[in-house]
Structures are given as structure tokens and as C-alpha cells.
Amino acid sequence: MSELRIYPDSGSERHQRFVDAAEIAAQLAEIGVRFERWTADKPLTPQAGQEEVIAAYRADIDRLMKDNGFRSVDVISVSPDHPDRKALRDKFLSEHVHTEFEVRFFVDGRGLFFLHIDDWVYAVLCEKGDLISVPSGVRHWFDLGEHPDVKAIRLFSEQSGWVAHYTNDDIAQRFPLLERFLAEREMGPV
């Protein structure tokens, strides 16, 4: 189940919690972040390759590409046995910005986005069926977890693809990583 937690950027306590997709979308829309739920046009197997995955979501992909001027699309998969999983996780865990939108649609698996806006941090647990679109210039970081299992569609405006500009702020260290976030959810409201 998708979840949004809004914390003060001090990281000291949770401010608000949302689990309804419509409420998550409304809260994120207030800060200019798109959150949608998509359904595949046809069934996919876990082994589905890039072309098959893109074809299954073609109508939604085309809509976003037309509306936002995206020029390329690909699929990234990171599994628990991926040889570069630790390096990938470390690269995403530091606060950074992009000069273009960061758009991810979760075909399978899950990941935890953190958006740092003004004095607040929005922690968005994205799972299968979730799309998040983070505008350029928004400070954020992402945790795919210690044992990543994620397949995601990415859309880009620039041919260079994913390019991060790190803020050198240690804020990400004050917030729960994916495993702790999930454990807190299992324990109930904190």
C-alpha cells in the first residue's frame, strides 16, 4: 500500500500520514508533484522486458510525453542479486536535484522517495502501480532498500538521462530508510 508521511525537516517526528491514493495525490499536487495510479493494458510476467513493459503502459506514457515534452523512455530493474545494487542505492540516498523532471512509474516492487520542500520532508512510499513526477529543482533523495526489488519506467526530457546535482546536505541521514519505514508501518502509527 502506498503511503505519504509529512515530517518537519528536522526529522524529529511525523507530522501527518496518508494512505489513500487520492489523498496522497492531493497532498503532493499542492507542492507541484504528480502522483497517479496506472494499470497495465495487458498482463505482464515478472520476466517482461523493456519493450513489453512499455507497450503495456503505452497510452499513459504517450499522454505524459505529449503533456510534458518528454523525449525518451526506458525501464530500469534492480533486484536483490543486482551486482551494483549497493552502489546504486548509495548514489540515490544523498539529497540532490535535477534540471528536469524525475518521473518514475513502479511496474513492480517499491521504493521510498523523500522530497525536501521548504521546512518539510514528504516521504512517499511508491509501490506497484504508482507514478511519481518530481519537478526539476526539487531537493530529494530515494531509497530502493537493502534488498532492492524494483522495476520502473523512467521518462526523460534530456537525452543524457538521470543526472544528479548533489546539495551536500546531510538531511537524508535524519530520516528512516526503507526497511525502518516499513517496520514502523507494521507497528502502527508512531
Image: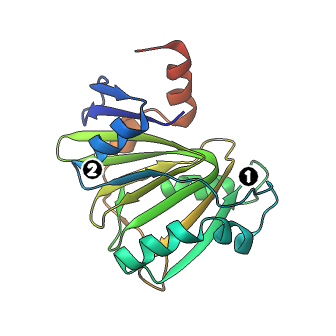
Image quadrant occupied by the N terminus: top right
Q: Quadrant of the C terminus?
A: top left
* Residue 97, x across and y down, in percent: 33, 63
Identify the disc placed on residue 79: 1
Residue 163 shows in this picture: no
Side of 183 relative to 148 (left or right) = left
Please tell me which of labels 1 and 2 falls first in the chain: 2
Q: Work out whether 186 lies above or below 103.
A: above
Image location of residue 102, percent across then percent down: 41, 65
Image location (x, y in percent) of residue 133: 39, 59
Residue type at the position of mark 2: Ala
Q: Position of residue 67 (x, y in %)?
A: 35, 74
**Residue lying at 60% horizontally and 65% vertically, measured from the top left:** 57
Q: For mark 2, does the 10 Å Cα neighbourhood hold few (<14), some (14 to 19), or many (20 or more) residues?
A: few
Point 31% across, 54% down: residue: 33
Label 2: state its secondary structure. helix
Write down the residue under mark 2: 29
Alpha carbon separation for disc pair 1 and 2: 31 Å
- Is residue 137 visible from the viewing direction of this image? yes
**Residue type of the residue flagged with mark 1:** Ser
Q: Quadrant of residue 137?
A: bottom left
Seen in the image, is 73 located left or right of residue 30? right
Q: Residue at x 28, y 59 (%)?
A: 138
Secondary structure under badge 1?
loop
Front residue of this view, candidates 180 and 174: 180
Residue situated in front as seen by the camera: 184 or 51: 51
* Quarter location, residue 179: top right
Total tally of numbered discs in the picture? 2
| Closer to the camera in the image, 21 or 73 | 21
Vertical side of 11 occupied by 127: above or below = below
